[in-house]
Each structure stands twice: as structure tokens, then as C-alpha cells.
Image: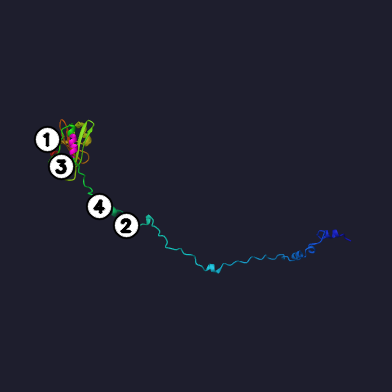
Amino acid sequence: MTPTGATDAAAGTRPSTGPTASESDPAGAEAALVETPAGAATPEPALVEPDQADTDVPPARPTGRPARREKPRSERSPRDMALSLLVLLVPIALLLAFYRGFLGGEQPTVVDPAPAYEQARSANAFPVGEPAGLGSGWRTVSASYRTVEGGANLRVGYLTPEGRGVQLVQSNVPPEKLLPNELTAQGQPQGPTDVGGRNWQRYTGRGNDQALVLLEPDRTVIVVGDARENELRQLAGALR
């Protein structure tokens, strides 16, 4: 006879050492008998179909009107640019009209030259002359008396009836220094001329300016501006 241990070893089983699982747990034995057959496919989970109610709802639409897109500057038409420019020019034109019509814009400010003449006479630095007999079209727009290096200057500015600017300068500064300062290096003598019985010299000045110069021992008188010569002569001849 073959021993029991040898028979079990040949059959590939271990020798029994105690009661089997079926004997100790009948329920476990029944569960062990229910096994999934080899090669059987594992059941796949059921597909969940989307709710039909969700597919029937249309997408929400944005509320309100979409924001208007500004045109880039490069896409603006000439008409748009002209309208923008017109919007800017209209207020400027209205302000300019108000300035001229109601505030007296572009009207020269007239000053009283009497204090400057009085100050020059009080200083007694040189004989002081003052124009007399000028028409109402002549307006005094500036007047000052100042001490400068080498002497003193009395300077009175006028606006002529033709709207030109003229200055009357009286000074005891030496002519060789005064004339280059007042007429610049462009000032060149053009010859003598008689004005009111006195011998004046005609000079060129800066730009379109021209001048009449009276040289006296105690003072030098200059009438200079962009006015025409007849107005320069009128002012020079009125000097008393």
C-alpha cells in the first residue's frame, strides 16, 4: 500500500491537518462553489444617457445691446475728422468774438507819459523835449525814464494813426554807444534832412525800421520805428 502522505504529494495537494473549510463553514463552502466561469467577460457598467430635458434648452442669450466698437483712428473718414475739428473751432471762435466785441481785445493800452517826462526833468540829466500838436490818432503806449550805464534814457512809445510803432528816445549816453544799442549794427547813416528847422540825420535800423537822429551837445534824440518817413518826420517836428 502507498502511504497517505505520498499519495497526497503525488496529487499536488498538501496533507490534511484538520477539518476542511466546507466542514467548518458550510456557508463559505456554498460561496466558494459560485465562481465566475473562466474566460467570461466582465459586465460593463450601463451608459448613462443625458437628460432629454437638458438637450432641449437653448443656450442663454446675452441681455442688452452689444457695446458699440469705436473706430480706430485709421478707419475714420475725412467727414468724421472735419466734424471733430469743427467741434473744437466753434468755441474758440465764440471766445475770440467775445474778447474783441465786449472786452476790447486787440485795442492798444494807452498810458499817460507825464510821470516819465516829469521824472526826466527832475533828474536834470539832459534837456527834455516833449511832442506838442500831435493829432488824436497818435496814442502813447509806453513811457519810462531809466538810469543806464553811461547816462540816462527817456523812452516814449507811440502808435501812429496808420497803426505803426514809433519810439522817441532822448539820452545823454554818448552817441557812439547809444546808436549801436538802439539801431543795432545794421544802423547806417543815409544823409542829413531838415525837420522843423533842425538838422537831423537819416539812419537805417533793424529789419524794416528807419530812424531820424538829432545830435546835440547835451543829448541825442532818436525817432525810430517801422512807420513811414512822413510819420517819423511828423513826430520829430512836434518835439519842443
Q: Is mark 4 on a helix, strand or loop?
A: helix
Spot occupied by residue 154 in the image (x, y as percentages of width and height): 19, 36
Spot occupied by residue 61 in the image (x, y as percentages of width and height): 47, 64
What amino acid is found at the position of numbered circle 1 in the picture? Arg
Find out whether the residues at labels 3 and 4 contact each other: C-beta distance under 8 Å: no
Say if residue 168 shows up in the picture. no
Residue annotated with mark 2: 83
What amino acid is found at the position of numbered circle 2 in the picture? Leu
Q: In this view, does 174 lie above or below 165?
A: above
Residue annotated with mark 4: 98
> From the image, which quarter does the N terminus lie in?
bottom right
Residue annotated with mark 1: 198
Q: How crowded is the residue under tag 2: few (<14 C-alpha within 10 Å), some, or many (20+)?
A: few
Q: How far apart are marks 1 and 2 (CA)?
A: 64 Å
Nearer to us of marks 2 and 4 is 4
- The boundaries of the magenta stretch are 113-120
Q: In which quarter of the image is residue 13?
A: bottom right
Q: What element carries label 3?
A: helix
Q: How far apart are marks 3 and 4 (CA)?
A: 33 Å
Residue located at (26% from left, 53% from top): 94
Q: Residue 231 carries which label?
A: 3
Nearer-N-terminus badge (4/1): 4
Nearer-N-terminus badge (1/2): 2
Q: Is residue 237 magenta?
A: no
Nearer to us of marks 3 and 4 is 4
Q: Is residue 88 above or below residue 109?
A: below
Q: Distance between the residues labelled 3 and 2?
A: 48 Å
Spot occupied by residue 164 in the image (x, y as percentages of width and height): 19, 44
Considering depth in this image, is 231 or 41 the residue closer to the camera? 231
